[in-house]
Image (cartoon, rainbow, N blue to C red):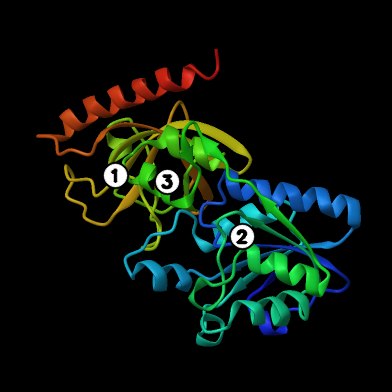
Amino acid sequence: MEYVTDVMSAAVQGRSIVTLGKFDGLHRGHQRLFQKLKLMKQESGCTTVAFTFSTELLLWKFGDNFKCILEREERRHLLEGMGVDMMIECPFTEEIRNMEAEDFVRRILLERLHACCIVIGRDFRFGHNRTGDYRLLEQLSGECGFELQMIEEVYDEDIRVSSSAIRTAIAEGRMEDANRMLGYPFSVEGLILTGQQLGRTIDMPTINLVPSAGKLLPPFGVYTSVTQMEGHCYQGVTNIGKKPTVGEFAVGVETHLLHTSGDFYGKFARVSLLHFQRPEQKFPSVDALKEQMHKDAKNAEEYLSKFHT
């Protein structure tokens, strides 16, 4: 997949099929867009393009404390896995922010990307003051000769699948709901770092990740999890928080891999959170913490066994 950050120098050889969005989460609704792109590519052979924006757009819209469901690299890896030919991550510059919707279509989508088809969701808005929508694109498609496809919204029971609904579910620790709307498990990924190694002393060795400050996290607590690492999948139990019992204060993601041992420092891991077990709490002693950690591990095994019987 070609990765482009300078939209004014982006160029497509031949024609393209373009979809646009913020794509925070790349949830089931977004996935429908990319399924459509894949089908249309098979029919036409055109280049498929995902046009999105850097996280500055979300910070500008929602404030500096906004947290993303997907970090930049996570979103990039997922899009590549969906078979997209080109990802354009447009910086949210003053020029782009003030560009009128029609100018954006003509100057960027048609002149630079040679779009022969534009695929959008029903609620997509773009351009200065969000004046661009399906109706404007429909009008321009007749004038400029490109095809327009609108993808209907996806519902999970009675709830419209959206980044906002997923963000709310994650913030409330409803991981099953969030994962169902995402279409894949919510994860935290990164390189495994050296921790205090307390787990080794209580026969509960753990791997430690430190998420970035911009990553959305569920409530502090203990989660049943699955960790992917070097092509292997490990069941586990994960604590997210500041480890109040042992006096640590930085937010970390600490995972005990069930029935697994080894030196994993420096390796890349993706920890997927499946189920919220309990809130983080401070225990009167390390022995009390050890007892609870063994209970947490047993609860994780019982939960995970439901999916393997």
Residue at 17% from the left image edge and 35% from the top image edge: 286
How dense is the environment of label 1, judged by Cα within 10 Å: few (below 14), some, or many (20 and up)?
Answer: some
- Asked if residue 226 lies left or right of residue 122, the reply is left
Q: Nearer the viewer, residue 285 or 45?
A: 45
**Compared to 213, does 294 lie above or below?**
above
**Residue 288 showing in the rendered view:** yes
The amino acid type of the residue labelled 3 equals Ala
According to the picture, the residue beneath numbered tag 2 turns out to be 76
**Compared to 94, does 21 lie above or below?**
above
Task: Tell me how far mark 3 sits from mark 2, CA to CA.
Answer: 22 Å
Tally of marks = 3
According to the picture, the residue beneath numbered tag 3 turns out to be 165
Name the outermost residue toward the bottom.
Answer: 95
**Residue 114 showing in the rendered view:** no
Q: Nearer the viewer, residue 213 or 266?
A: 213
According to the picture, the residue beneath numbered tag 1 turns out to be 219
Name the outermost residue toward the top.
Answer: 309
Q: Nearer the viewer, residue 302 or 234?
A: 302
Find residue 149 and report its horizontal and vertical position in percent.
73, 55
- Asked if residue 111 lies left or right of residue 53, the reply is right
Disc number lying in front (1 or 3): 3
SS at mark 1 in the image: loop
